[in-house]
Image: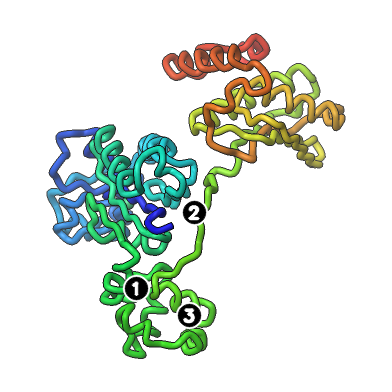
Amino acid sequence: MALNIMHVDMDAFYAAVEQMDKPELKGKPVIVGGVSLSNRGVVSTASYEARKYGVHSAMPIVEAKRLCPDAVFLPGRHERYSEVSRQIFEIFYQYTPLVEQISIDEAFLDLTGCSRLFGDSIQIGRRIKEDIYNKFGLTASIGLARNKFLAKLASDMEKPDGFFVIEDKDIDRILEPLDVNKIWGVGKKTAEILRSRGIDTIGRLKTLPLEELENLLGKNGIRLYYLSRGIDNRKVEVDNPVKSISHEETFAENISDKNAILSSLLRMSSKVSRRLRKAGLIGNTIDVKIRYGDFTTYTRSISIAVGTNNTDVIYQKAIYLLEKNKLLNQPVRLLGVGVSNLSPEGPEQLSLFENNQKTDDLTKTIDFIRDKFGETSLIRARNLDDFK
Ligand SMILES: [Mg+2]
């Protein structure tokens, strides 16, 4: 049971991605700011070279410029960071499906049950760190412990490029000297209340009985009582941050022509399907939304047994929903299609119940051509009218 929870936190992620893409920036202070980089913006991420000058995230750009005038200031490129993030998460999924994404560059992994395949959790942690470094040249800080609270503390202990394990026997020794604000959920206010009672370290916090902490801080006090003893029962929640992927359009004029409606529906299904594939997701629920000229709006959904990200499956189910519910009998102002109930795309979805291999290959080819030559390089016959 011990040491099965891992926390991964990429080091100075945005700045590190910039240094990866522009090798001439390696070893230099790099500061990634808001999109505009205006003096009113704040620092998103500072490379460790810039942190030496006292620059940190959330600091006004003006101040960062004063502290480190020679730094390279760059606007954020969030698309790019998301892309790298997705590839890093793919590495996690090679080891376990139990991945909880905390942010673009941070995750908890539950390694229970992985050991037979990949070695013990320490070996897995080392391998993940190496995989990330070998693939991107980026460093991650990794913490391993028996629960989330301790794993997150551990990843912070030797940051950057850290690898730290909190074994059960060391929990008290490691926790007790730490500042109370190291406990997850202890903000400025709580820390102040505790400090006003002479409680500055986790060790001191442990001297307070449960009742006293509850009187002082309510429910949060109970939580702190347990966390200060290294007890945290929260599970790694495998919860994809994206709940659904959908696309909707309001038409310039209300549309009555059924062919025109279906043509739009196909185009939207294709967009949704492509976004799903890019995110490596499939979904088990297809939704449609339709709004008429008088603004009455209907949404309908259907669940399917085998998750999909296939344009034709999405499109056919969407048509089915519109026809079955007799929703195509009035001029349409807005139309939308979406896929929800999402899960990561896995090899098991290949042709379990139906032979979709051919369409999947075709879809991949279409994706490839569109990526290379642009969205309108390949158009389905039904969509030709849209481009006249
Ligand atoms: Mg980070």
- Left or right of residue 201: residue 51: left
Nearest the camera: 280 or 315? 280
- Residue 93 in percent (x, y) is at 44, 38
| Amino acid type assigned to the residue bearing label 2 in the image | Val
Residue kind at label 3, given as amino acid type = Gly
How many residues crowd around disc 2 within 10 Å: few (fewer than 14), some, or many (20 or more)? some
Residue 129, quarter of the rendered image:
top left
In-front residue for pair 83/7: 7
Q: Are marks 1 and 2 in contact (CB under 8 Å)?
A: no
Residue ID at (24%, 53%): 162
Q: Nearer the viewer, mark 1 or mark 3?
A: 3
- Position of the C terminus by quadrant: top right
Quarter of the figure that contains the N terminus: bottom left
Identify residue for label 2: 236
Residue displayed at 53% across by 31% down: 345
Residue that carries the numbered disc 3 in the rendered image: 221
**Residue 181 badge:** 1
What residue occupies the far front of the structure in this picture? 116
Question: What's the residue at 44%, 76% (across, down)?
Answer: 224
The percent position of residue 382, horizontal first and vertical second, equals 68, 12
